[in-house]
Image (tube, rainbow, N blue to C red):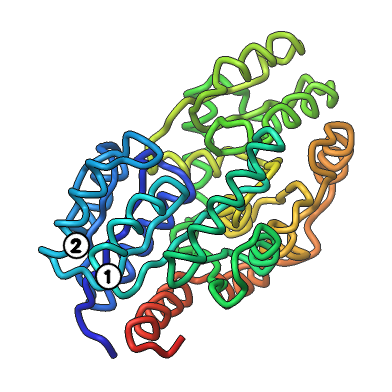
Amino acid sequence: MILMARILFVSNSSNPGGMEKHVKDLVVGMRKKRHEVFVWCPSGVMADVYENEGAKVIRLAIQFDVDPFYIVTLFYFLIREHIDIVHAHELKAVVNSHLAAFLARVKVRISHSHTPISTWKKAFLGSKLTCFFYSTFVNMFSTRELALTEQIRKIKIKEGIKAEKLIVIPNGIDTKKYDIPKTVREGYKNEIKSRYGVPRDAFVLGNLSRLSIEKGYDTLIEAFSLLKDPSSYLFIGGGGVLEEVISGSAKKLGIYEQTIITGLFEEEDKVKFLSCLDLLVFPSQTEGFGYLPLEGLCFGLPVIVSDIPALKEVCREYVTYFKKGNALDLTGKIREVKDKLGSFTFEEVVSFINKTYSLEVFWDSYNRLYENSLSNKI
């Protein structure tokens, strides 16, 4: 085993989200594996989280697509700190950190665009050009590119990344976090319903995700309006650029009084929000993995997700699927699930997640990747 490899994680976001949680889990796991961990990221909530988990955090944002000041500053840092591995997340962080790492002769340079670029909500030509640039860059400068699922790996190969560069490692889930006594959950449910003025006997469906276009909230809002059920409430936990747009859509569709939009929330509220839900709906247009559906399953909730390849691979037969972007189909699935018990017991679902997506499996996979990369076994 390689002891105390010096690993740098690079991100250009400190807002809570799936990618940022992924980095936090890597920080925790690699410290458990006795590696020395550094993080470069902007100032923000997650920078503080990484630091609290024991990483040495340098708070610096990338200002331009190619930022000369950032690259030079990082170049000298890599040499001074004798960094063994640079693992960068998302396009801008990959480009700037890998240029610095290549110049500093860092042996292992791992890149990870969590959601394939070709699935981003961009104009066709813009998406094509960005894919070409990213795949060419990765093929030249990265020693490895990560994919969260086999389906994502196939998409990345189509985008132009060499197959031998790619390795699949799914995210990890801490199922113990959601093992909460029934009485505590009931207390959380009552607390949240009281906080947002939701009747105690109301049926609550919703989603807890960043309010951005790829998360499919337009489909969810429309589907809920088609339910025409005054006893149901729509719970939208999270903040983001579309908060005012979503609020406006709810008013226009006549469901504003039945819609809760929390804005950004503290991590400890997530379990409370899940306790309040009777049904979790995850209508994403594109995902690299999708933490939330698995978290909902760990909580014993029925879950409906869009039928995109990554979610079908991750969630398998344990959730209900609807046609991506089809509000009418989603409405029908909501009606079906409301009165139907799941086909699997809670114990079966948690057993599946523990075997496939536990944090221990996640940490072991990355530790093996880093060790093998440094010893030239891959």
Q: Secondary structure at mark 1?
A: loop
Determine the CA span between mark 1 and mark 2: 8 Å
The residue under label 2 is which amino acid type?
Leu
- Depth check: 100 or 308 in front? 100
Image quadrant of residue 338? Answer: top right
The residue under label 1 is which amino acid type?
Val
Q: Categorize mark 2 by other alpha carbons within 10 Å: few (<14), some (14-19), many (20+).
A: many
- Depth check: 264 or 94 in front? 94
Label 1: which residue? 106
State if disc 2 and disc 1 touch (CB < 8 Å): yes
> Residue 53, percent across and down?
24, 58
> Residue 197, percent across and down?
55, 19
Residue that appears at 57% across and 77% down: 164
> Relative to residue 314, is residue 30 drawn left or right?
left
Label 2: which residue? 78
Mark closest to the chain's N terminus, 1 or 2 = 2
> Relative to residue 188, is residue 216 drawn left or right?
right
Q: Can residue 329 be seen here?
A: yes
Image quadrant of residue 47? Answer: top left
Q: Can residue 281 be seen here?
A: no
> Relative to residue 41, is residue 323 drawn left or right?
right
When the figure is inspected, residue 48 is found, relative to residue 152, above or below; the finding is above
Q: Secondary structure at mark 2?
A: helix
Residue that appears at 85% across and 42% down: 333
